[in-house]
């Protein structure tokens, strides 16, 4: 395991870095649970599950605040430099990305609640196929990004970039499919709109996974790649992983 939170002469610094890293990963698992529950609430018409997602969002808020406090204390007391500073900065950004992903899960839960309130029942099952598909893609990407962050593994971060193209492809397919329901039955317009909101939220969750993967590369390579072309980045870093050229800043 490539644990960059280990190896300092000050053992307490090791412990503080490890604690914050573990808190971020635990927050990520909580967000994954929220996305799963929210998507299930929508696809299964489970109102109580949707309400639980909304209520549990406060727990993610508290996790974010605890992590922010830990990061502030590390910066104030330890004044980290080099790779340690990169890790602290990356963990701070990843916390923000996870909070945003958690907010999107809550939005999906609200979609389920609004459909039930307006229709008196869950969404028509045939409108939900692409919710299930995008849920699978988004959670796979988020899980990959958390695994990359846990070990600071560039190859796992690159896997996120390779697979994220599925997000837009599935969203586009979903939009085309949903429009056929409106054309065929105008009474479905309201719930189709809610499903579109849910699809957009799932795409955003997948995007946050990509953002986390970018931070992993920042820690490992010392280069900010947020605005780099992903195809070129994959090719360059894959070559480097195989012993080729390096990544310029």
Image: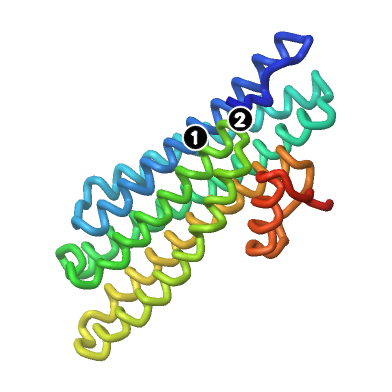
Q: Tell me: 140 left or right of 40.
A: right
Q: Tell me: 80 left or right of 1.
A: right
Q: Nearer the viewer, residue 89 or 104?
A: 89
Q: Residue furthest bottom?
A: 183
**Residue at the spot x=42%, y=76% of the render?**
172
**Residue at the spot x=69%, y=16% of the render?**
14
Which quarter of the picture shows residue 184?
Answer: bottom left
Q: How is the image coloured?
A: rainbow
Q: In this view, does 181 lie above or below 71?
A: below
Q: Residue furthest front?
A: 243
**Residue at the spot x=15%, y=65% of the render?**
120
Q: Mark 1 or 2 closer to N-term? A: 1
Where is residue 241 drawn, in percent x and y? Answer: 67, 44
Where is residue 210 drawn, in percent x and y? Answer: 57, 53
Where is residue 234 drawn, in percent x and y? Answer: 64, 57
How many numbered marks, from 0 up?
A: 2
Q: Is residue 159 above or below residue 193?
A: above
Label ID, residue 14: none
Where is residue 128 drawn, in percent x and y? Answer: 25, 67
Q: Provide the residue designation for mark 2.
A: 67
Q: Is residue 3 above or below residue 244?
A: above
Element type where label 1 sits in the image: helix
Q: Do the residues labelled 1 and 2 touch (CB within 8 Å)?
A: yes
Which quarter of the picture shows residue 32?
Answer: top left
Q: Which of 118 and 199 is in front in this view?
A: 199
Q: Provide the residue designation for mark 1.
A: 27
Q: How crowded is mark 2: few (under 14 residues within 10 Å), some or many (20 or more)?
A: many
Element type where label 2 sits in the image: helix
The span from disc 1 to disc 2 (Cα, nearest Å) is 9 Å
Q: Residues within 10 Å of mark 1 (few under 14, many from 20)?
A: many
**Residue at the spot x=66%, y=58% of the render?**
235
């Amino acid at each position: 395991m490539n644990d960059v939170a280990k190896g300092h002469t000050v053992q307490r610094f090791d412990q503080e870095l490890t604690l914050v890293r573990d808190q971020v990963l635990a927050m990520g698992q909580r967000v994954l649970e929220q996305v799963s529950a929210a998507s299930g609430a929508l696809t299964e018409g489970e109102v109580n599950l949707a309400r639980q997602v909304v209520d549990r969002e406060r727990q993610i808020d508290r996790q974010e605040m605890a992590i922010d406090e830990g990061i502030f204390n590390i910066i104030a007391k330890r004044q980290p430099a080099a790779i340690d500073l990169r890790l602290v900065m990356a963990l701070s950004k990843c916390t923000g990305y996870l909070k945003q992903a958690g907010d999107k899960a809550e939005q999906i839960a609200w979609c389920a609640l609004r459909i039930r309130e307006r229709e008196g029942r869950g969404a028509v099952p045939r409108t939900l196929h692409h919710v299930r598909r995008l849920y699978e893609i988004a959670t796979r990407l988020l899980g990959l990004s958390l695994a990359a962050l846990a070990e600071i593994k560039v190859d796992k971060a690159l896997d996120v970039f390779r697979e994220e193209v599925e997000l837009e492809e599935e969203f586009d397919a979903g939009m085309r499919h949903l429009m056929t329901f409106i054309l065929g039955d105008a009474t479905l317009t309201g719930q189709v709109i809610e499903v579109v909101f849910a699809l957009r939220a799932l795409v955003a969750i997948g995007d946050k996974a990509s953002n986390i993967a970018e931070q992993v590369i920042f820690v490992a390579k010392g280069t900010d790649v947020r605005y780099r072309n992903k195809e070129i980045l994959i090719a360059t870093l894959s070559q480097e992983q195989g012993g080729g050229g390096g990544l310029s800043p």
